[in-house]
Structure formats: structure tokens, C-alpha cells
């Protein structure tokens, strides 16, 4: 059988990590045969947010009068490093990372305090929501600058859900990969699978394909409007 190669781009879609592509004419395969789909390659930008209003991580609260009054810094949605976060803060607040322990140190000038009770940014720094900081404090937990994203899952509507399971639940997950170790904004080649495995498909008549990207918790990954491209391969498979 001749393999069918499909390249799908988010270029004409508003949502770059969850979109449906219509085919005209559709792709009609032999209904008496079983087919599988494989992810050959997926190109996306490492630009999903760790600080955003929707995640509640965009607010940093501090006091410069020993807690009598509080001020807020509101970050623009984006993917920030520790040094980029530090550059937005007042000079009297210094945030640094310890590579060996993956902890964060927040050093405050006299009279300055930081609190996390009204924001979720504490998770990125490895602190607790109830913490009110003075002086120099090291986070009790490891920093989490990926905001909890430990796996990037590529979903495809063609996948037979009985053959793909995520956290004990049937799903359309086609491929899973760890986040990259790259500078923010870099082009991220998610996978170069070369058709080494195929998941059974749920149809032989393809009128449309939905592709979407989530983290391991099922949360949609917002990559700040950068395009994604998926290369799929379809072929007949032996189910014996």
C-alpha cells in the first residue's frame, strides 16, 4: 500500500495549538482495511507562557514600608527566565537562582517585603502561597519555571482512543515529549519519529483532522500565537 503523507499547519487558524483542518476532497481509504497514523515531525516554538493572567502568575506583590501598604507589579504574558523577572522588579528586590539546588533566593532591602497570598507566582519560585518574605530567603522547594509542564502531548483526532491512555483515561494522544532545554522563542522540533510506530485510526474517511497540544495534565499549551506544523504519515497496519 502507498503511504499517505499529511502536513498540517496552524497558519490560517487563530488558535495555534488547537485547530481543525478541513480536507476538500476528503481522504477515503479502503474501509475493509485497518490503518494507523504516526507523527513524523512537529515543529513549534518554545514560547508557551510561564507567566500569564490566565494562570494567575502575572502578579508580584511587595511592600516598601514594612508591610503597611502593598504594591503590585503586573507582568505581560510571556515566557520569562529568572533574570528577566528580576529586571522588571525594583532594584531593592533581587531574585537569583541556585543552579546546584534549583532553588530561588529572594534578597530584600531593609523595609521591603514580598507576599504571595494573592498570586500564583509563588509556584514558579518554589515558595508557598502563605509566605511573607523579609531579608534574604531561599525557597523551600525547587523552582518550577516551566509552571508544571513536564511533558508536551500532541493529540490527533484520528487516533483510536482505545489504543491511547493518559493518566488511566482513554485519549487521542499521538506522541509525548519532554519540554526542550532551549532559549525562549527557539524553534522546537518536537519529534523526528521517521514512522517507527503507528497508532490505529478511528476512521477510513478523513474529512477533517483536529490537532492540539497540551501538557501532561490536559491543559492547553498557549504558545503566544506562534505557528505549529505537524507532519503525519498514514499507512495500512497489521492488527493480528
Image (tube, rainbow, N blue to C red):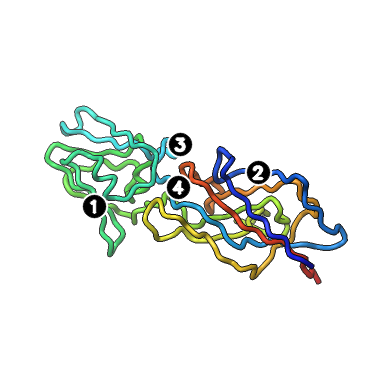
Q: Earlier in the sequence, mark 4 or mark 1?
A: 4
Which residue is label 3 attached to?
Answer: 54
Q: Earlier in the sequence, mark 2 or mark 3?
A: 2
Q: Residues within 10 Å of mark 1 (few under 14, many from 20)?
A: some
Q: Please state which of residues 31 and 126 is positioned toward the viewer in this rendering.
A: 31
Disc on res. 20? 2
- Circles 1 and 3 in contact, beta carbons < 8 Å: no
Disc on res. 96? 1
Element type at mark 1: strand
Return the x and y of residue 225 as percentages of the image width and height.
Answer: 49, 42
Mark 2–mark 4 distance (CA, rounded to whole Å):
20 Å
Q: Please state which of residues 156 and 21 is positioned toward the viewer in this rendering.
A: 21
Q: Quadrant of the C terminus?
A: bottom right
Which residue is label 4 attached to?
Answer: 48
Return the x and y of residue 94 as percentages of the image width and height.
Answer: 20, 46
Q: Residues within 10 Å of mark 2 (few under 14, many from 20)?
A: some
Amino acid at each position: 500500500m502507498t503511504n499517505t503523507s499529511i502536513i498540517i499547519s496552524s497558519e490560517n487558524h487563530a488558535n495555534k495549538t488547537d485547530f481543525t483542518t478541513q480536507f476538500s476532497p476528503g481522504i477515503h481509504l479502503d474501509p475493509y482495511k485497518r490503518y494507523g497514523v504516526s507523527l513524523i515531525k512537529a515543529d513549534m516554538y518554545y514560547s508557551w507562557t510561564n507567566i500569564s493572567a490566565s494562570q494567575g502568575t502575572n502578579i508580584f506583590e511587595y511592600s516598601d514600608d514594612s508591610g503597611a501598604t502593598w504594591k503590585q507589579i503586573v507582568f505581560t504574558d510571556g515566557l520569562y527566565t529568572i533574570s528577566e523577572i528580576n529586571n522588571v522588579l525594583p532594584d531593592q528586590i533581587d531574585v537569583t537562582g541556585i543552579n546546584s539546588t534549583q532553588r530561588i533566593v529572594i534578597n530584600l532591602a531593609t523595609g521591603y517585603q514580598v507576599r504571595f497570598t494573592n498570586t500564583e507566582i509563588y509556584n514558579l519560585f518554589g515558595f508557598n502561597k502563605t509566605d511573607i518574605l523579609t531579608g534574604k530567603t531561599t525557597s523551600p522547594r525547587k523552582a518550577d519555571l516551566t509552571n508544571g509542564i513536564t511533558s508536551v502531548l500532541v493529540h490527533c483526532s484520528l487516533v483510536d482512543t482505545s489504543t491511547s491512555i493518559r493518566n488511566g483515561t482513554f485519549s487521542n494522544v499521538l506522541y509525548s515529549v519532554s519540554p526542550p532545554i532551549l532559549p525562549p522563542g527557539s524553534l522546537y522540533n518536537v519529534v523526528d519519529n521517521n514512522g517507527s510506530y503507528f497508532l490505529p485510526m478511528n476512521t477510513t474517511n478523513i474529512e477533517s483532522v483536529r490537532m492540539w497540544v497540551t501538557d501532561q495534565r490536559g491543559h492547553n499549551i498557549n504558545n503566544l500565537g506562534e505557528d505549529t506544523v505537524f507532519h503525519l504519515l498514514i499507512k495500512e497496519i497489521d492488527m493480528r
